[in-house]
Image: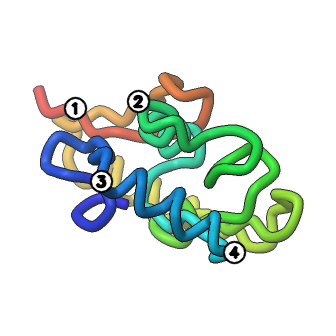
Amino acid sequence: MDGTLLHSKSQISSGNANAIREAMSRGVQVVIATGKARPGAMVVLKTADLVGMDVILLESSSGVFLQDLLVYGKQGREIFCKNLDPNFCKEAIEVDVTHVLYKVNKFKSSAYCWVVW
């Protein structure tokens, strides 16, 4: 989505939203592929009225999320999930104690961010 479907303010232009609706009305199946988590993608798509029945994204839709780490197939069933190796995460935390890893639950999904003090 970022850099393709979304403009510089991370929103979908009305032209892109209309093009998606037109494609779907002609039978094109649209599947979202994004680095965002599914709930984050839904927030962006909702602003363009592209969340809900007969539009792009529902909790039961196919999609590729989190930089290809999480993939949903038919009926929104998880078909692929790759987690980071816990040893890698541990090593990353130990590299520099001035960085703190914390969990963000803004969109009811887990995301981890670095804070530099």
Residue placed most toward the observer, 38 or 85? 38
Q: In the rendered structure, which disc, 2 or 3, sits on the residue that comes first in sequence?
A: 3
Could you say which disc has been placed on residue 102 in the image?
2
Instruction: Give the labeled residue for mark 4.
Output: 27
Instruction: Give the labeled residue for mark 1.
Output: 115
Estimate how packed mark 4 is, as few (under 14), some (14 to 19) or many (20 or more) residues with alpha carbons within 10 Å: few
Q: CB of mark 1 within 8 Å of CB of mark 3?
A: no
The type of residue carrying mark 2 is Tyr
Q: In the rendered structure, which disc, 2 or 1, sits on the residue that comes first in sequence?
A: 2
Q: In the rendered structure, which disc, 4 or 2, sits on the residue that comes first in sequence?
A: 4
The residue drawn where x is 42% and y is 53% is 18
The type of residue carrying mark 1 is Val
The type of residue carrying mark 4 is Gly
Instruction: Give the labeled residue for mark 3.
Output: 15
Q: In the picture provided, is 45 more to the left or to the right than 114?
A: right
Instruction: Tell me the CA gap for discs 1 and 3.
Output: 37 Å
Residue placed most toward the observer, 63 or 5? 5
Q: What is the quadrant of the C terminus in the image?
A: top left
Q: CB of mark 2 within 8 Å of CB of mark 1?
A: yes
Q: CB of mark 4 within 8 Å of CB of mark 3?
A: no
Q: Nearer the viewer, mark 2 or mark 3?
A: 3
Q: In the rendered structure, which disc, 1 or 4, sits on the residue that comes first in sequence?
A: 4
The residue drawn where x is 39% and y is 59% is 91
Q: Nearer the viewer, mark 1 or mark 3?
A: 3
Q: What secondary structure is marked by label 3?
A: helix
Q: In the picture provided, is 44 more to the left or to the right than 79?
A: left
Q: In the picture provided, is 115 more to the left or to the right than 66?
A: left
Q: Nearer the viewer, mark 4 or mark 2?
A: 4
Q: What secondary structure is marked by label 1?
A: strand
x, y percent for residue 59 = 76, 44
The type of residue carrying mark 3 is Gly
Instruction: Tell me the CA gap for discs 4 and 2.
Output: 43 Å
